[in-house]
Image (tube, rainbow, N blue to C red):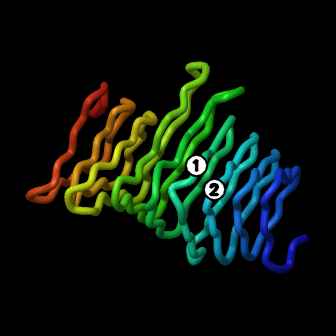
Amino acid sequence: AVTGPLTIAGAVNFASEVTLPDLTLTGTLGGSGRVTIGGVLRWSSGTMVGSGVTVLPAGTVVEISTGNAKSVQDGRRLVVETPVVWTGGSLFLDNRSVGGATVENRSEWTFADGAGVAWSNFNGLPVAFVNAGTVVKSGAGTQSEISAPLGNEGLMKVNEGTLRLTGGGTSSGVLEVAAGASLRLTSGLDFPA
């Protein structure tokens, strides 16, 4: 059990379920276990990897800083149930060894400035950005891109700037674009009945 603040600057693997009250991530969080971050996640660089799941429950404070690389790799699921404002670069979904790297947004995820989600496709195996909540694009005069395959079951709001969806996927939810903002679909996004 971890009872206080934890900093991961190297590689740490969790093989069983653990709750971390406070995490600073600049290294690699991995393993097959379920990791719940219950207080604050400070993510300035680093990777979440492995067959496990990382859960950010409602009430967790997420602090994203710097433009340094941040990635979810090789089967890892990142389940977000709390608001996130993503600034300072892209979140990479990588399939270096296996597919299945997935981000599941169940709350409100805001892409500010030029932040986005990029697919580092090493072997053609699937990754996904799944929105079951609300995705917001903000930042007048800026462009964000989601190049990973999209599964939109919720609401995507382009309030300012441009949102480019270039990875294909499906949308059974709502795409809402404010006056003066722009949504660009440049790859096969399907709208099922």
Type of the residue with mark 2 = Ser
At numbered mark 2, what does the secondary structure look like: helix, strand or loop? loop
Q: Which residue is mark 1?
A: 69
Of residues 108 and 24, the one nearer the viewer is 24
Q: Which residue is mark 2?
A: 45
Furthest-right residue in this view: 1
Q: Give the residue at x 87% y 54%.
A: 16
Of residues 138 and 157, the one nearer the viewer is 138
Furthest-front residue in this view: 67
Q: How many numbered circles does the render carry?
A: 2
Q: CA distance from mark 2 to mark 1?
A: 5 Å
The quadrant of the image that shows the C terminus is top left
Task: Decide: few, some or many residues near mark 2? Use Cα within 10 Å; few <14, some 14-19, many ≥20.
Answer: many
Question: In which image quadrant can residue 51 be found?
Answer: top right
Type of the residue with mark 1 = Ala
Measuring from the top left, give residue 180's x and y in whole percent.
Answer: 10, 57
